[in-house]
Image (cartoon, rainbow, N blue to C red):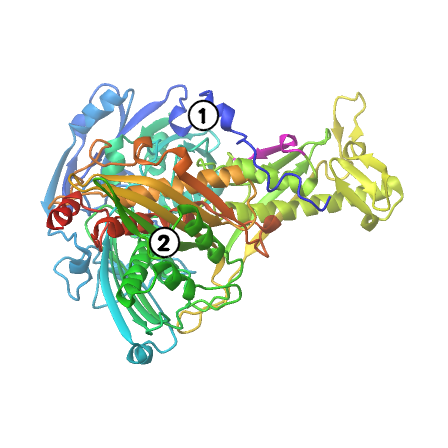
Amino acid sequence: MSELRVVGKSMDRVDGIEKAMGRAVFGNDIVLPGMLHAKVLRSPHPHARILSINTEKARHLKGVKAVITSKEINDHRHGAGLRDQTILAKEVVRYVGEAVAAVAAETIEIAEEALGLIEVEYEQLPAVFDVEDAFQENPEVVVHPDLPEYDGSPNMPPKLITERPNVYHHHKVHSGNVDEAFAQADYIIENRYTSPALQHVQMEPHCAVAKAETDGTLTIWGSVKTITGVRTFLSIALGIPVSRIRMIVPYVGGDFGGKQDIQCMGITSVLAMITDRPVKLAFTREEVFHCATIRFPSVMTIKDGIKADGTLLAREMTVLQNGGAYADYGFLTVRNCMFAATGTYKIPNFRFASYGVYTNLPKSGAFRGFGNPQIGWAVELQMEKIAQKLNIDPVEFRRKNLLHEGDISPVGEKMFSVGISGCLDKAVEAIGYKKGALSWQEGKWKKGIGIAIGNKYSIAPTAACASVRAREDGKLDVMVCIDETGQGATTVLRQIAAEEMGLEVSDVRLLYENSDFTSFDEGAISSRTTYNTGNAICLACLDLKNQIRAKASEKMGIPAEDLNVYNNKIYAKDNPDNFILISDLFKYNRLATGRYIAEGGDLLGKATWEQGCLPEDKNGLSERLNAFFTHGAHAVQVAVHQETGQVKVEKIIGVFDMGTAVNPLLCQGQIEGGAVMGLGGALFEELIFDQQGRTVNQNLTNYLVPTVLDVPKIDNFQSYIVEAPHRDGPFGAKGLGEGTMVSATPAVSLAIFNAVGLWCNYIPVKYEQIREVLKNN
């Protein structure tokens, strides 16, 4: 039984048939009797003072049941890390699309008509959109004049800069002696990189249904994630005890970081309480594009000092994050993006500064990778630029500077479970790269190979709770507060529980949708579910087995420590044929209508997994800052038509280390999904704002995302797994999801560069510039 039976084996998703047959229920499928429909009036201005709002005409429209503005909501400021926003704008709007008023009506059409009857008088104020303008000392526009008065997280208070009033948070790290190392370097290479705002483009837009129960409980169904966090923010914003907010989360049609915002839930909750009827709010695709959270645009500068033999001596990096109108989860990316600044490289002297800056663009928040993809893209382009300058093979240059098991990272962490070397080697082999052969021509097509690596941290400190219940028929119930956003968590966690208890996956039921029956979990963020929730389930199973052994000991007359629990049996370690079933521990009632446990009623194991970290020193360094790192590499081959500039992605190779692969099939799916997202960031995706801060491309006609026509055929789209088991992970497993896109974007950018010689310090690539380069060549 030492060999793993379930973990490490590919199996179909447990929700696959339900989804394929169209029976799966998503947030937007929820319809309740007597349900009203909500619509939101949004600001047409990027920055303005609200002088008056007249809702009388809207209130008197037949079919309208409620109209709310900030005056009708006794809400408090909320936010992740910094409480700087309200559900509806109070006094000032700070971006185009900010919610100003909301209507609940019998139909969507009536609600939309009512919005046209609301009269708002604004006094327009100067606006700022460029992050470097907003970052200036004494800027012309201060987005939040009251920033110093805002409450922050007691565990991570904001670091403000008095002379730079638009900076809502900043983070600095310093190791070694950077200036001295620069003086000793043979080469100094410095570059500036920029990345744009992106939208998550989930298949299912944001939506929520709220219902005020007669007992004072507020029940909310929604397409959200991080149930615990959403309940907490709603509690703060609405002044309702957390225990009186019940979240029921069905399947979520995609998240990627964008569904932690409480805007939908907050508006529907207030309207439901006012009307005493269920209320539904579903964003249109256009609303998602111009008012939901986005990935922050960024400006990055990297200065490196290198010896002539290719040894990295020092790096200095500065990042300006355009946080938009509110900090949201962008508050945390200010710090956490530093882990991508070093990549998976040994850099003995390192200086880093990151700044979150308010502007009058839509608010930035979590986005798959949480700051790592755009920072990692810049780092990998910088590494390629250095290799080119030193005339060193770029793969060998990366290999020379890789971190290995037991090394200390530039931010002070001792590295373990480091599979990056194997990932790079496999990517190079699979793409067929030979030293120096990065480009060639076939007919009218110029071809190039790009190879890039990257990593993704997973946050600490964090925690997850789990309860497991043995049923009288030998089945197992697992209760955890997780989110199934499409990543396959409900399958993987069943596999972990089944492995720990020696059961089949079909014997395990996962209960996770209802916050009334689950305990704390930080949710599907930072690729943490497999590792953290998986560990909590393993500990809860151990607690359950201890209880089972203790009860079986009395029944079998064998000391508990001499018993094993496996596959619904309790047996003597020295005689497996001497066993009883778990069902034998249950008693029948008088009429044999049910069974129970004499003491406690249930066989219930409970546990909390706490992932700690070590305090940072005065320079921001620590030996343990994260739970783990996911490492990976991409190798991409592109073809560029020498006359039209058309780019075809011909091959994608993705290789990743996720510790033990609990379900290799699902891991391969994650790797492929991350590659496609990274490809989109390199070639197409970019939110464009006009001079008034309005989103220009607010639909899928002009905001392009990759389709099946943009990726290679299946034989040339390959995923590989490198296993470097983690000492603390459940059966050696780590997380995977976010890390799979970090190296994809730079690999595509570098492939284009090697094909045609176009060096882009920005993404996405501009096709007119490809054509210009081809014309000049």
Q: How far apart are the alpha carbons under marks 2 and 1? A: 39 Å
Instruction: Give the residue number, with chain letter if any, for mark 2.
Output: 452
How would you rate the neighbour count of disc 1 (Cα within 10 Å): few for under 14, some for 14-19, many for 20 or more? Answer: some
Instruction: Give the residue number, with chain letter if any, for mark 1.
Output: 25
- Viewer-closest of 588 and 512: 512
Residue shown at 45% from the left, 25% from the top: 25
Task: Name the kind of residue labelled 2 in the image.
Answer: Ala
Residue shown at 20% from the left, 58% from the top: 145
Instruction: Name the front one of labels 2 and 1.
Output: 2
Q: Position of residue 640 (x, y in %)?
A: 23, 42
Task: Name the kind of residue labelled 1 in the image.
Answer: Val
Q: Is residue 40 above or below residue 572?
A: above
- Viewer-closest of 487 and 402: 402
Task: Find residue 274 and report its image quarter.
Answer: top left
Q: Position of residue 709 (x, y in %)?
A: 30, 31
Task: Find residue 253 and report its image quarter.
Answer: top left
- Range of residues picked out in magenta: 504-512
